[in-house]
Image: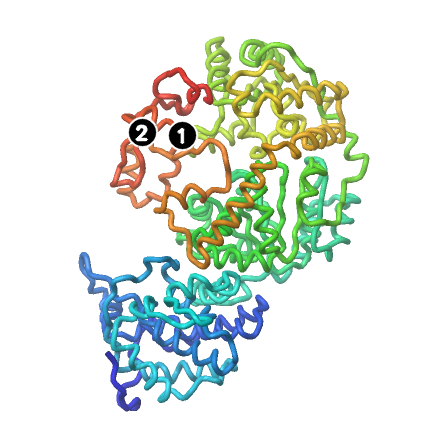
Amino acid sequence: MAEPLNRTSIGSEGLLAKPDKGLVEHLAEVTALGAEIAQRLGLPEPLRVKALLACAFHDIGKATTDFQSYIQEQRKKAIRGQRKKAYPHALASLPFVLLAESLLAQRYGWERHRLEATAAVLTHHSPLGPELYKGFETVAYHPGLEQVLCEVWALLEAHGVRELPSVEEFWRTVQPWLQNSPAALLEASFSVDGTNRTLRGILQGLPPQEFAQVKAVLHLADWLASARTPQPSLLFLSNGDSALQAHVRALNKPLRRFQSQTHQARHAEVLWLRAPTGTGKTEALLLWAGDTERLLYLLPTQATTNAMWRRLRRIYGEDAVALAHGRALYMLRRELRRESDEDPLDERLFGSVFARPVTVATLDQYLLAHLHGRHWEERRTLARRATVVLDEIHAYEPYTLGLLLEALEREPPARLALASATLPEPLLALFPRGTLIEAELELWQRTRHRVELREGSLLEDGSEEALRYAREGKRVLVIANTVRDAQALYHKLAEWGWENLTLLHSRFTLRDRMQKEERVSQAEPGAIFIATQVVEVSLDISYEVLITEIAPVDALVQRMGRVNRQGELAPAPVLIYTQWSEGTQRVYGKELLAWSLEILAQLPPTPTDRDLAEATHQLYERVVPTEEWQRELAEGRATLGELQHILGCYTIDLSDEALRERFTARRGMVTVEVLPVQFVEEAYQLKEQGELWRLPELLVPVPIWWFREFAGCFAPNSDLRVIQADLPYTEALGAAVPTRIEGSAAILE
């Protein structure tokens, strides 16, 4: 409990925010950074003031005897073994920011229950939720606190906030709230529109966008204060157009007509771009983005995201471009350690919340932010101020599209581009109307493939054709629709003695998968590459022959894009086996496969890129209106709306099973990463070497139904915090089903 003191007797100079930084100095730095960030993000005046309040008060709770004792021990490096953590300073800050925001509400005429600054301060270290800070007792404030308040008043006045009462009046008013635990305030009742609500309930019910903006400014300012270069300009792109123009000049190729058109359309708020693979679609999108201050480039897979991250770093500069996906931490450690021994803290932190000027991310990261995943406040605030590019928009299931459409409708970005080589009209009709730009006619006239529909099955008949072409020195791509069939094909060709053989599917360790991707990208003549759908939008390869099982037209067009990619060779053979397996039918559905076969039969033997795009349009015209497709689209939209309504300003609690089931951007077979037993010893070695960040290299995704069917094969490993799995795994084949079983689950393999 604090007592009024003569502030000349005890000053604030000795109070620390960090072992190497004084409390007042830190508050001043964060407030100055917050003021500039709020201005750059265009926060309206009420939210700008609230953001300044949050920045100025966020760490005032460090002026407690408990925290100062804790930080002094850290400073002296005197901590030994386990020690009780200091009292949460965000909670200790609550009475002060709550009173200040309430008083300013009276002065400015704000709604009294709009407490965005209070919510931001309370949650700047822990997400807002129903159990946050329950059970905490009272705390003893440091005698120097009143002097800190004087400094805070000076900070706020310097930034134009002059409507607070005097420090003396504020100090007297806050005293009753300091008699009890600050946590008690969260359960206290306040009158809102004639009804009593707890403060916790009031904070949950705040307008999410406004709360998110205030918290985003606080977090970004606080993180920048600890960054290597604490400058808000690092969050914004200042020379995007000139950097891209330099890149284009270095290519030493004249712009194509459609690229020039996108550059001329750079003032369009929504762009639709349709251009064949390998014609410069990415450069066109970046020309449209122009001098945007923030660019968010979204792609379907981690592999495509990694490749685009490397590409955009070369254009905009390494410090300007961030990576965000489920394996980003691993990728950053792996890639950036080659350049520096420092832990890439800034890259990890700012990349994960879309805070770099350019962020390359999977669409999942964008959608999970709208499903209230951790740091949703920063991601959504920054995305709303960004130019958002949705590349390969054709690649998503209707449920994912439903989530996306609902997110874009609720919180549209500053500018939006949709792009694909096959941008079907029925798909475009779902999105906001845009300026459509198409590649010039001559680019669509390429004939890169010679398509043959073959009777028979891929497994029985396709393997012989693959071997025949390989013996002729061709590089052959064989694509099966299930892991089981891909493994069976590999077995057969290996038994026939063909050694130049590689298998790739989703059930390899990350290490093996990366090695295989590198190998197949530099394949020699006579190579046979057997894969599943993982190649459709992830690998930048160009083979000479494609042999595949029948699949939906749009998927087949993507597969064809991995053969004779640039169209520099004579039309490449594409053999499509029309007899589909039961597993394929379960994956795609009989009706979709039959429609695709009918459309394919109408193609000319050497279709142009325009013919293939039109075939995709025809399939979408049939599929989009179907009851099942529309139902899944509606489910996606409803899920996002329902979750946001339930959670309000809360971050999703993934320990809640019902909420966790909805926290996904994709439908389909759910997988869980496990550690095969043969890699356990290697994992422990990584831990001993301090390199446990490399553990993802050893993990394998397996279907969740395996846990039910083969429960004895899986066990938690608490030391490594993974699930250990006793299952067949080889570098050549990947993970296989532990025991062959009959039944519908096994057939999905």
Q: Badge 2, how many Cα within 10 Å: few under 14, some, many 20+?
A: many
Residue 264: where, in percent of width, then height?
77, 54
Residue 44 occupies quadrant: bottom right
Residue 487: where, in percent of width, then height?
46, 18
Residue 570 occupies quadrant: top right
Residue nearest the observer in this picture, 248 or 635:
635
Q: Badge 1, how many Cα within 10 Å: few under 14, some, many 20+?
A: many
**Marks 2/1: CA–CA distance:** 10 Å
Q: Are marks 2 and 1 in contact (CB under 8 Å)?
A: yes
Residue beneath label 1, please?
A: 702
Residue 600: where, in percent of width, then height?
70, 21
Evaluate whether residue 158 shows in this view.
no
Residue 213: where, in percent of width, then height?
51, 64
> Which mark is on residue 499?
none
Q: Residue at x 25, y 81 (%)?
A: 2
Residue 85 occupies quadrant: bottom left
Q: Quadrant of the N terminus?
A: bottom left
Residue type indicated by callout 1: Val
Extreme-front residue of the structure: 194
Residue nearest the observer in this picture, 745 or 534:
745
Which mark sits nearer the N-terminus, 2 or 1? 1
In this rendering, would 363 be left or right of 2?
Answer: right
Q: Residue at x 62, y 39 (%)?
A: 392
Q: Secondary structure at mark 1?
A: strand
Residue type indicated by callout 2: Ala
Q: How is the model colour-coded?
A: rainbow
Q: Quadrant of the C terminus?
A: top left
> Which mark is on residue 725?
2
Relative to residue 226, is residue 140 depicted above or below? Answer: below
